[in-house]
């Protein structure tokens, strides 16, 4: 059947990360590879209570088909939270519930992208976005990230060159780099985008997980109509429920409803009702504080272990939130070679080249700190340091 | 932002059915319009037990991210059931879990369809398939249904003309017509498809809901490699859980995994675990017998009410299973006009033209019998008969 597949499949490859996850199934491997939240923080008992309640009180309805846009009280909750947290005025009709924010990316691709359309991605960029968009056959224009956000000079150059349909950005605790756009950078971006019709797709799955520094405005507060926001319950409640959302103007949401209906009718209604009940009965802010505290400790431990064990030539980011930090090795070292050798020491990570649509990033890697406990972090970083040192010595 | 949307969106319209559902939200309207299962048959208590069990025994895992292809024990269950029920040899790696079979249709479109590819649809055809495929911009070639399945002479003509990528068929209790392909028709189809590389997409959400006649073989038993099967738990467990599956050869499943990963990473894992636990702890066949009995009674009552009240000139199908029957009015009557007038009598249905990609079906309509109780069926059919008679009299 091989000659039957659509042309778009020629661009698609299985995620290297998911392939790594298979390797790291071995329990003796310490894995900094995945992007998993810490499951000890899942509110298992509270979700069990919420589940029992919605089934007992409204079982026939919560198991029935439902509306494509999602459960209204859940959309109202999300809209109100944007107002409370970010000072954004959002109408519930500007929210559509998705199967995690990955489906948000796919639906944006479906609704907006023709083959050959140009997209600006951060360099390095979020792998899920690269995968989702690839199937709509766009042309990627990667623009480098600096320490405080995208390189605005190069971004302007890209926007002033060919027509750009969309700019995908993770402004808070970016995946993979861990960097956060500064307030000034956000203002600069707003100034640049005022002159363009390019969609700014603000992908914000980690925004609530800030454990250092000050919360900063959403790009929607500067550029209302041109911004599409993606959000998720995966990092603050639990990812197995596959619940995220798209926040956009109603003319965009109307088109996305059509695409969503064709894609899968609607998101899991049972899970929507459970999460809505959970949010009504519990203080999510208290729960998020707990997540932040744990992740801050895990990040602090990873950074102190890196400082203690890694050679001085190795650089790394110090994220103010989220789940990842980014390591830059001396140029002579290939992270893929390091990955192979690290396997022998039972420690894993994602080589940075997975996050580049061009040939870049060969001496970079991503480390996840949310899904390892303290002992694993110290031990894993020490093992990794050993291999880095061996490679450095061999290259001298 | 209107000039920003992708070209494919020009082909897409909101489902007329979902628009009707909004109208029928009024509780005094008797609706034969939707395609909803009878919620009184949902195993609410048993699902509550299964949910409590998986959360208590394995809470951190059931709420975490999981694999794209789906939970292995659930895929094993589906594979074994194909063997038990249909004598099909299916490997668990030939199963991928989807968000209902609607997502199966979308993923098949994503993996196989280039713009301009030709698809044969049944005429009338399943609206969800028309919607899902439309966004991949194929050319539809509708081939009429006869009483015992597709018109094979016209089907062969289509296959021998232009190259056909895919044939979408609902061989059991078709939506919208309620017809079932006879054994002979299945054999004829197998003979025809042996000479073509066209994919036969056997969409089978209702196959378990047979309440009359004999169970018949899946097309996969005749045409192994060329058949892709779609299945669903929506009609035998509950649709709000959004769980269906694709069954295909592993080379196809591998491509679908790539597309699924890009679309939404994986289906709701919590729901997969709940359904798997429910299936392990309960006799699903006993539950299905109950559904069949109720739906048979509802169909019988709808047929006897039609026989009693509708004018003789009106024709209708007598489905052996599923949830729908199909009505053909005298040619002079427009079902859309009937729909408008029926609204005044507080009764609703879906005008048949929604199921045609050409201009056909204006004097046809679909009636759902699964989601109305006995009193509603009698009363609704009587109301509808009144309007049909008025229209007939006005046309004389």
Image (cartoon, coloured by chain):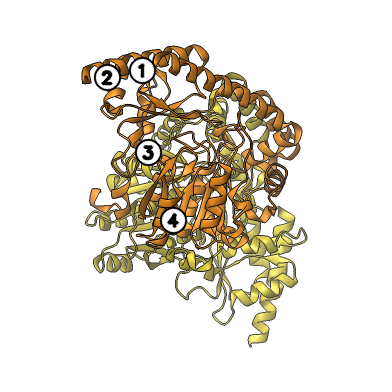
Chain colours: A orange, B yellow
Indicate the secondary structure of the residue bearing disc 3: helix
Q: Which residue is mark 4?
A: A156
Horizontally, residue B272 falls left or right of residue A381, namely right
Task: Evaluate whether label 4 is on the same chain as label 3.
Answer: yes
- The front one of A154 and B137 is A154
The reply to whether callout 2 and callout 1 are in contact (CB within 8 Å) is: yes
Seen in the picture, residue B142 relative to B62 is either above or below; the reply is below
Mark 4 touching mark 3, by CB under 8 A?
Answer: no
Residue B39 appears at what percent x and percent y? 66, 45
SS state under label 1: loop
Please tell me which of labels 4 and 2 falls first in the chain. 4
Q: Are marks 3 and 1 on the same chain?
A: yes
Q: Chain of mark 3?
A: A
Q: Are marks 3 and 2 on the same chain?
A: yes
Badge 3 is on which residue?
A: A355
To which residue does mark 1 refer? A311
Instruction: Tell if the residue under mark 4 belongs to the same chain as the one under mark 1.
Output: yes
Mark 1 neighbour density, 10 Å: few (under 14) some (14–19) many (20 or more): some
Q: Can residue B87 be seen in the rendering of this structure?
A: no
């Amino acid at each position: 059947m091989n000659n039957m597949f659509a042309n778009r499949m020629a661009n698609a490859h299985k995620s290297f990360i998911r392939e790594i996850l298979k390797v790291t199934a071995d329990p003796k491997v310490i894995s900094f590879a995945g992007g998993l939240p810490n499951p000890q923080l899942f509110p298992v008992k509270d979700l069990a209570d919420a589940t029992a309640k919605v089934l007992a009180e409204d079982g026939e309805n919560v198991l029935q088909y439902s509306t494509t846009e999602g459960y209204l009280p859940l959309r109202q909750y999300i809209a109100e939270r944007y107002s409370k947290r970010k000072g954004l005025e959002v109408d519930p009709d500007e929210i559509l519930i998705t199967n995690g924010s990955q489906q948000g990316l796919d639906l944006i691709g479906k609704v907006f992208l023709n083959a050959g359309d140009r997209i600006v991605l951060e360099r390095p960029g979020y792998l899920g976005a690269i995968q989702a968009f690839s199937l709509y056959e766009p042309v990627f224009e990667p623009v480098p990230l600096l320490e405080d956000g995208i390189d605005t000079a190069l971004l302007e150059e890209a926007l002033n060159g060919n027509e750009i349909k969309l700019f995908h950005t993770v402004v808070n605790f970016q995946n993979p780099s861990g960097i956060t756009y500064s307030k000034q950078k956000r203002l600069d971006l707003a100034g640049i985008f005022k002159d363009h019709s390019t969609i700014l797709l603000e992908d914000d799955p980690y925004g609530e997980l800030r454990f250092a520094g000050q919360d900063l405005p959403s790009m929607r507060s500067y550029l209302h109509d041109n911004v599409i926001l993606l959000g998720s319950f995966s990092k603050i409640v639990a990812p197995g429920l596959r619940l995220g959302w798209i926040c956009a103007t109603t003319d965009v949401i109307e088109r996305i409803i059509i695409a969503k209906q064709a894609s899968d009718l609607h998101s899991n209604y049972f899970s929507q009702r459970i999460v809505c009940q959970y949010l009504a009965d519990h203080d999510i802010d208290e729960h998020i504080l707990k997540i932040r505290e744990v992740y801050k400790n895990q990040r602090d431990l990873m950074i102190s272990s890196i400082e203690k064990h890694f050679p001085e030539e190795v650089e790394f980011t110090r994220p103010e939130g989220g789940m990842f930090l980014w390591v830059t090795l001396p140029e002579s070292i290939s992270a893929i070679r390091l990955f192979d050798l690290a396997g022998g020491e039972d420690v894993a990570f994602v080589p940075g080249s997975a996050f580049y649509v061009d040939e870049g990033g060969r001496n970079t890697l991503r480390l996840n700190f949310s899904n390892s406990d303290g002992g694993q972090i110290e031990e894993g970083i020490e093992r990794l340091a050993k291999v880095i040192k061996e490679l450095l010595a061999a290259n001298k």
